[in-house]
Amino acid sequence: MPVVSWLRAAGLAVVLLAALALPMSAALKLCGKGGCKARRKFCLKPRLNPAVAVAPVVAPVAGYYGVMLAPIYGKGLLPGTGGKLDFEALKPRMSPNEYLVAPEEAVPNFVDEAKRGVAKVYPVSRTELREAFFRAVNKQYAIQLYAQPTLRDEALDQYVFVHRTLYFRFPDVLNVRFVDCEGGVSVVLHSGSVYGYDDLGKNKARVETWLEALDEELSMLPKSADTAGASLVEGVEEPEALVVEAEEEEAEEMPAEAEVVKEEEEAPEEDVEEEEEEQEPAGSSSPASGTSSDPEEEKDTDTTPEAEEEKKEETESDEAEEMKMKMKMKMKTVKLEVEKLKKKKTAGPFRP
């Protein structure tokens, strides 16, 4: 146990003993004349005042809470009472009663991985992150006086807070600093106990609770036009990616008719003429023989390569138009879905 912790414990014991001795001496008195004095002895008689009788019980409790609630923590007034930390030179304690969350490159001398976590990088300005953090801290306390920092260093953008446990009011000192990182702004948050050796995971739980409240506050901020136009919120793909996926799906689902048309285009004209001759009935005669059947049938069967090419071009143009219409409809549906997702993600009460 460090020497500072022993000094704090000894000072607390002296205060409690003094608080206990004063009401005891007031509750008891020496005998005056006669009796005990004649025998050259002192006689102690308790007073019958009820308020003085309960003083030995009330005074230690009042002294204890007077020490715990004293406005000296987190200000660096006395050794061991907490204050502003130097994160560049901060090293882990011998005891497990602390926890730190910081970016990987920050706080280089704090090498205890069991008492350290990695902080997020927020794509906002430092002012927005600071204001959101203060709002998150204010929501943790019913009395706003306890949510105010005890020390401020605006040059380093570092602030000191004091948090006390619910019943015994043990003070824990928190240091927070807002730093610039690649891709945005991050936070360095350290929570350490003033008294006790083991905090039973309270400091880690408190740091995580404050960071969760910070994430909630940042989620309520309105998205700027630049960030909204550049990319959508997390979990939603960009419109261009959705369009590409729609095109790929449409290409995979193309009917087999398009393939058939391509094969017909590649086939030679002679094969087409042979197929037409085979499809002609046995009783019909060719136009070269001079005999012909019904003129309506001749119009239907008498097809030249030029007419066939025209028909192919017409079918191809019709299919191309259908494909364009399908793609336009697919694009419209994709854009509508993206707009709906944007509205869902950005919706929420705005709190300045």
Image (cartoon, rainbow, N blue to C red):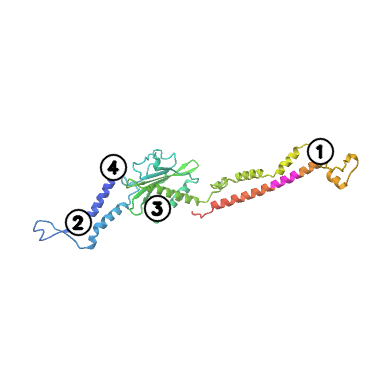
User: Residue 304, percent across and down?
Assistant: 83, 41
Crowding at label 4, few (<14), some or many (≥20) Cα neighbours within 10 Å?
few
Mark 3: few/some/many CA within 10 Å (<14, 14-19, 20+): some
The residue tagged 3 is: 147
**Nearer the N terminus, badge 2 or badge 1?**
2
- The three-letter amino acid code for the residue at tag 1 is Glu
Residue topped by disc 4: 3
Sequence-earlier tag: 4 or 3: 4
Q: Name the residue: 37% across, 51% down.
A: 163
Work out whether mark 4 precedes mark 2 in sequence or the reverse, and give the earlier one: 4
* The N terminus lies in quadrant: top left
Give the residue number, with chain letter if any, for mark 1. 274
Q: Tell me the magenta residue range.
A: 315-324
With 221 as the anchor, is 5 left or right in this view? left
Give yes or no for contact between labels 2 and 3 (Cβ–Cβ under 8 Å): no
Q: Earlier in the sequence, mark 4 or mark 1?
A: 4
Please give the label number shown on residue 25. 2
Secondary structure under tag 2 reads helix
Q: Mark 3 and mark 4 in contact (Cβ < 8 Å)?
A: no
